[in-house]
């Protein structure tokens, strides 16, 4: 299956036009997710799901703020999947592919029951970016990473960022 990542990223950027922080965040999570997914040897379909979800993982923030007055993770998980479905519709991707992408978007702030390598890697990639963007002290980043990170590549990225 040929996934038009450049077009998906462009649609994400158009949706978030005028919000460089949100666009930069999504692009960084996409880069880390791609790196970790490739290095961890994901099959092409799972990698495609991961990269698509990473590009769109925070796509619900705008509606979360508008409808709930908050960008909190729980509202992102509610508001993100419908927007993602709309943005992905023109690409006519298989329904099960889109549903998994939407599941990941709808759970990327839920750490208690991480199931599947795509879910695991999306969480790790988002945390790597959030640790830096939120100015989390190195000790706190390492401790949180120790509790949550399971992939060898995610742990290596964390160690390289916070030796």
Image (cartoon, rainbow, N blue to C red):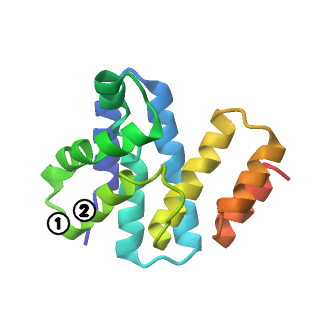
Q: Residue at x 34, y 28 (%)?
A: 62
Seen as rendered, the residue at the extreme front is: 112
Tell me whether circle 1 and circle 2 mark residues in contact (CB < 8 Å): yes
Percent position (x, y) of residue 112? Answer: 53, 61
* Residue at screen point 19% across, 63% down: 93
Asked if 137 appears above or below 105 in the picture, the reply is above
Q: Which element carries disc 2, helix, strand or loop?
A: helix
Count every numbered label the image shows and give the total: 2
Percent x, y of residue 156: 73, 64
Secondary element at image label 1: helix
Looking at the rendered image, the quarter that the N terminus falls into is bottom left
In the image, is 86 to the left or to the right of 69? Answer: left
- Residue 41 placement (x, y as % from top left): 53, 78
> Where is residue 97, by image quadrant?
bottom left
Q: Vertically, is 33 above or below 37?
A: above
Q: Would residue 23 appear left or right of 13 to someone viewing this image? A: right
42 lies above or below 111: below
Q: Which residue is mark 1?
A: 95
Decide if residue 6 is in sight here: yes
Of 118 and 109, the residue lying toward us? 109
- Are there few (<14), some (14-19), or many (20+) residues within 10 Å of tag 1? few
Which residue does the numbered mark 2 point to in the structure image? 99
Looking at the image, residue 8 lies above or below residue 94: above
Kindly report the distance in space between the C-alpha atoms of the residues bearing marks 1 and 2: 6 Å
Q: Name which residue lies at 83% across and 46% down.
A: 139
Residue 34 visible in the current orientation: no
């Amino acid at each position: 299956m040929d996934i038009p990542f450049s077009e998906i990223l462009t649609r994400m950027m158009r949706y978030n036009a005028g919000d460089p922080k949100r666009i930069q965040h999504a692009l960084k999570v996409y880069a880390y997710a791609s790196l970790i997914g490739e290095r961890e040897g994901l099959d092409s379909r799972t990698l495609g799901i991961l990269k698509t979800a990473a590009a769109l993982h925070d796509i619900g923030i705008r509606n979360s703020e508008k409808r709930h007055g908050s960008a909190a993770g729980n509202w992102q998980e509610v508001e993100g999947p419908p927007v993602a479905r709309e943005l992905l519709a023109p690409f006519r991707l298989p329904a099960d592919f889109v549903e998994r992408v939407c599941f990941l978007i709808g759970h990327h702030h839920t750490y208690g029951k991480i199931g599947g390598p795509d879910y695991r890697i999306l969480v790790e990639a988002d945390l790597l970016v959030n640790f830096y963007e939120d100015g989390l002290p190195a000790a706190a980043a390492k401790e949180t990473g120790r509790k949550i990170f399971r992939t060898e590549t995610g742990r290596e990225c964390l160690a390289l960022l916070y030796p």
